[in-house]
Amino acid sequence: MSCNNSVDLADRNNTRERLRTEKPNVLEKFILIDQNGAKGISPPPVIELAYRYECNLVCDHCFASKFSSKKKSLSLEDVRNLSSQAHSLGISQFILQGGEPLFWPDFDEVVDAINPDNFYIGLVTNATLLDEAKIVHLRTIGIDKIVISLDSYDVAKYEKNRNKSGLFKHTINMLLAAKAAGLRVVINTVATKENVRDQALLDLVAFAKKHDFVVYVNFATPIGSWEGRYDLLLDQSDAEYIYQLNKEHGVIKRDTFPFQGEKVGCPAFRSIVYITEYGDVLPCPFLHISMGNILDEPLPAIIDRGVRVSWFKNRPALCLAAEDRTFIDQKIAKTYSRPTPVSMYEIFTKEELG
């Protein structure tokens, strides 16, 4: 982790101080990652795990419903095996996604199967199933960070998109309750060509700064329910606008600049991998290309294969899913109107696979 400013440094130090007493095994991993980073050694990727895709909402930008169902979904034992492999690789973080993870009837068992003593665990949620008691419970079972979706700081727009009145106030209350419970709080929001320069985004940033939250911006991608929607994609000037907000405010981040004023490029297979309900390992949540399946082969073999693909080998400067029009036109478009994820052998050439 590179922290070149007071906001990121304070967050880093606060996290490590808490882990010192609560999760010393995770702190050891973080320290080793820091030491290796000083030697130019890249850290192992974060695992984003979608154990199940069921959800209690229908959001217009969701891609989860587009994944084709398979005969076998991940079991708790599969999660335990994944955790063991991840621990052996020195992986330090799991991020639980859905669907809506709190909609899983065995959510607590999934967290336990990961083994929270060995991992920093984040949860991505729409907040509808949260209350203060639930938040305290999440902290108790080993959740470290909560990522709450808030697509707009404009109440009417947000509740229209979610088709649920009263959700905005509830979401704000849950953000504040999560902070009070000691969780690291991140706001997840989606930027499109239609909303990227709205005042609502600036209002969201101001709210986050006031409460020491992070605003994590996902750029619109032409997949899932937005398959082929190139009109929603941000252009270079929009991306630069978000980067300037990052440099100015610090709290607004995205995967290509996770720290203030520091661009690191596309994270696909370098800093994250995404694992579906059916065990497929994807380069990121927005690249629906299967590089292998953990139900068929070990995770280390799949990661090794992934980082050798020419598109991922040298970390791209642009997000492949949202900004690189060449990749979108030549690769992502091949997944359209097909059951996803699509096998890497149908997307990449033999030469690209390395």
Image (cartoon, rainbow, N blue to C red):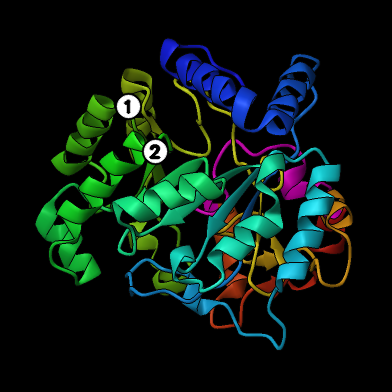
Is residue 7 positioned above or below 322 on the image? Answer: above
Q: Name the residue under label 2.
A: 185
| Residue lying at 53% horizontally and 27% vertically, measured from the top left | 263
Q: Can residue 335 be seen in this view?
A: yes
Residue corresponding to mark 1: 212
Q: Position of residue 64 (x, y in %)?
A: 50, 71
Residue 239: x and y in percent read 39, 37
Residue type at mark 1 is Asp
Q: Which residue lies furthest to the left in this view?
A: 156
Q: Bounds of the magenta span?
A: 305-325
Image-based side of 244 in relation to 76, left or right: left
Query: Residue 305 in the image: x percent, y percent?
Result: 85, 54
- Which percent across, then down, holds residue 183? 43, 38
SS at mark 1 in the image: loop
Q: Which residue is drawn at 18% across and 70% down?
A: 164
Camera-nearest residue between 264 and 337:
264
Q: Going 47% across and 50% down the picture, which residue do you hit?
A: 138
